Amino acid sequence: MRMSELRLAGIVKDSIVDGPGIRITLFAQGCSHYCKGCQNPQTHNIEEGKVMTLSEILKIIDQAPYIHGVSFSGGEPFLQAPAFTELAREVRKRGLHIVLYTGYTYEKILELSKQDKSYIELLQQAQWLIDGPYIEEEKDLSLPFRGSGNQRIIDVERSLSSGVLVTVMD
């Protein structure tokens, strides 16, 4: 696969549960977290899914003038960080809000970015990060935009600029 391609499990063109407003949600194919009770176990195998070019994905986004943003979910988007970063830059040029879902914690992403700069490059493109593995014992359907109580909605720009983790809502 080239950097200008993503392996996706699917695309939802009108999500209202993956971030604020109406969004397009891209489900990355491939995940190594294997959370017990995962709602998307079909995304785990990195060899499955469909390979799409970034231009194919941007065409779908451009054909949806009603959306407020794009969410990168999974699977695990950080397994394809360079291509998701490239896509995110194009999405931001269109003035759209980006929510990035990950099974990693914010702190782990910062740690991993010391060995792989693509992690911080992807993180820097998101306005919101919803972090942490899904923990079935902490399942809470009343929480907006997340599945378990350990997951946080992080204001990425404010957190990175201040050096202090800033959440959007509790």
Image (cartoon, grey):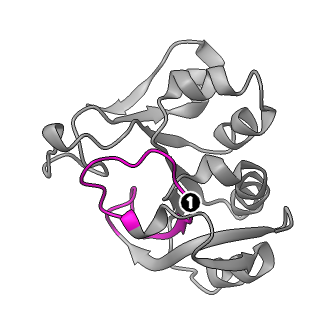
Give the residue pinned by disc 1. 30
Looking at the image, residue 167 sits to the left or right of residue 79; the answer is left
Looking at the image, residue 20 sits to the left or right of residue 117; the answer is left
Residue at image location 60% in from the left, 63% down from the top? 46
- Residue lying farthest bottom? 63
Please state the horizontal and vertical placement of residue 39, each as a whole percent of the image: 30, 62
State yes or no: residue 29 in magenta: yes
Please determine whether, in this image, residue 39 is positioned above or below residue 53. Answer: above
Please state the horizontal and vertical placement of residue 103, each as a whole percent of the image: 45, 41
Residue at image location 64% in from the left, 20% down from the top? 111
Q: Nearer the viewer, residue 8 or 170?
A: 8
**Quadrant of the snapshot with the N terminus:** bottom right
The magenta span reads 16-41
Residue at image location 63% in from the left, 70% down from the top? 47
Q: Secondary structure at mark 1?
A: loop
Please determine whether, in this image, residue 139 is positioned above or below residue 46. Answer: above
**Quadrant of the snapshot with the C terminus:** top left
Please determine whether, in this image, residue 125 is positioned above or below residue 2. Answer: above
Quadrant assignment, res 117:
top right
Q: Nearer the viewer, residue 113 or 165?
A: 113
Q: How many marks?
A: 1
Give the class, few, some or many, for how many residues have Cα within 10 Å of label 1's Cα (few <14, many ≥20): many
**Magenta region, main secondary structure:** loop
Please state the horizontal and vertical placement of residue 72, each as a whole percent of the image: 54, 58
Looking at the image, residue 169 sits to the left or right of residue 136; the answer is right
Looking at the image, residue 131 sits to the left or right of residue 149; the answer is right
Please determine whether, in this image, residue 108 is positioned above or below residue 134. Answer: above
Give the residue type at disc 1: Gly
